[in-house]
Amino acid sequence: MKCIEIRDGRLVLAERPVPKLKAGEVLVKVHAAGVNRPDILQRKGLYPPPKGASDIPGLEIAGVIIKGAGKGKKVMALVTGGGYAEYCAVPAKQCLPLPKNMDFITAAGIPETYFTVWTNLFDRGQIKKGETLLIHGGASGIGTTAIQIARAFGAKVVVTAGTDKKCRVCKKLGAAHAINYKEKDFVAETLRVTKNAGVDVVLDMVGGDYLPRNLQLLKAGGRHVSIAMQHGRVAELDIFQVMSKRLILTGSTLRPRSVADKAAIAKALHKAVWPLLGRGKAGPVIDRVFPLAAAQDAHDYLDAGEHVGKLILKVI
Ligand SMILES: NC(=O)c1ccc[n+]([C@@H]2O[C@H](COP(=O)([O-])OP(=O)(O)OC[C@H]3O[C@@H](n4cnc5c(N)ncnc54)[C@H](OP(=O)(O)O)[C@@H]3O)[C@@H](O)[C@H]2O)c1
């Protein structure tokens, strides 16, 4: 099969045997694969695949099951690696059906951000209807998904983004306020737009120096959910602030979690979010589609940071 390999920190088209199935897996003929920032980290050697996972990059796919349970079904799937390829072996429990009339390009942009956002907003962040959520990186693949899901479940959303254009897209998706963090101080602005009330949950992909600033914004009983650390993995924080406001600091990584954990998230998504997808009330924001052979161009484009939402590789 054709696939993408990482060689000397770059993505190149290669040929490999079709993957063999392990117990509980199905073989998917991949039509499209999503591109995510963790793939860039993997290419740069900063995010090695977990033990037993394919070294081919790619964390989400859409295609047709050609071997194993559900043969012939159109699915999208969260994978632990191996997405940038013509065929991918995936645990059956990590597959979800395509909603009616959804194409493979759209479907390939769903699993990674939907699994991540669901588990971090609801399992970890315990967000509730009527609460206020601050999302950093509102125009990212993760951010565009988080805005829609949080809104759909009745939360009020404030986001940060790096340009006015990105802020406008976030508002169109349902954010009540979008702060251009390159022009305004997000702490002062969030306090202004919330009339000094602050927020109940922060979904943070910045880390480092953002942590103490985020904590300032949390209300009593607030939850801080870390999903990335673009400003560094070490932060200095005021412990008394955590104590006095009874804050919860949490976070998660998705890729190394067990099939059972991912299956539980898939089940919850299918029940709560799939009806929204079916009715067009949520869905990925697709910025650009690249052919599989141009995967490196897709990474360069993602790295440049001009995109809004998701990039997809078209395999067929
Ligand atoms: N923990 C997990 O399970 C998990 C799973 C998937 C992804 N992630 C992480 O989630 C993040 C988003 O992933 P993605 O694939 O959606 O990538 P992406 O589209 O490239 O998003 C990166 C985002 O980071 C934002 N950003 C960078 N510096 C910022 C700052 N100082 N303040 C506010 N926002 C800032 C950028 O905003 P602007 O472009 O507007 O400047 C951009 O929207 C990545 O860091 C990724 O590693 C974590």
Image (tube, rainbow, N blue to C red):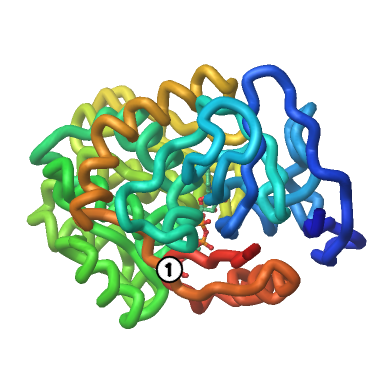
Residue at the spot of label 1: 286
What secondary structure is found at the residue carrying circle 1? strand
Q: Residue at x 50, y 55 (%)?
A: 108
Residue type at the position of mark 1: Ile
Quarter assignment of residue 31: bottom right
| Category of crowding for the residue at label 1, using alpha-carbon neighbours closer than 10 angstroms: few (below 14), some (14–19), many (at least 20) | some
**Residue 290, image x, y percentages:** 61, 74
Question: Residue 214, relative to residue 259: is it above or below?
Answer: below
* Farthest residue, direction bottom: 165
Q: Is 156 in front, or is 115?
A: 115
Q: Quadrant of the rendered structure where residue 121 is?
A: top left
Q: In the rendered view of the protein, which quadrant contains the N terminus?
A: bottom right
Label count reads: 1
Q: Residue at x 34, y 64 (%)?
A: 160
* Left-right relation of 67 to 296: left
x and y percent of residue 71 in the render? 55, 34
Looking at the image, the residue that sits furthest to the right is 8
Asked whether the viewer can see residue 256, the reply is no
Is the CB–ligand 1 distance for label 1 below 8 Å? Answer: no
Locate residue 311 relative to residue 197 in the image: left or right.
Answer: right
Name the residue located 43 percent from the left edge and 68 percent from the top edge: 286
Residue at the spot 27% in from the left edge and 23% down from the top edge: 246
Q: Position of residue 85 (x, y in %)?
A: 72, 54
Identify which residue, 265 or 132, lies in the foreground. Answer: 265
Residue 277 appears in the figure: yes
Q: Nearer the viewer, residue 186 or 67?
A: 67
Q: Quadrant of the C terminus?
A: bottom right
Residue 214 placement (x, y as % from top left)? 35, 47
Describe residue 6's horizontal placement relative to residue 91 as left or right: right
* Image: 54 above or below 257: below
Establish if 118 lies above or below 285: above
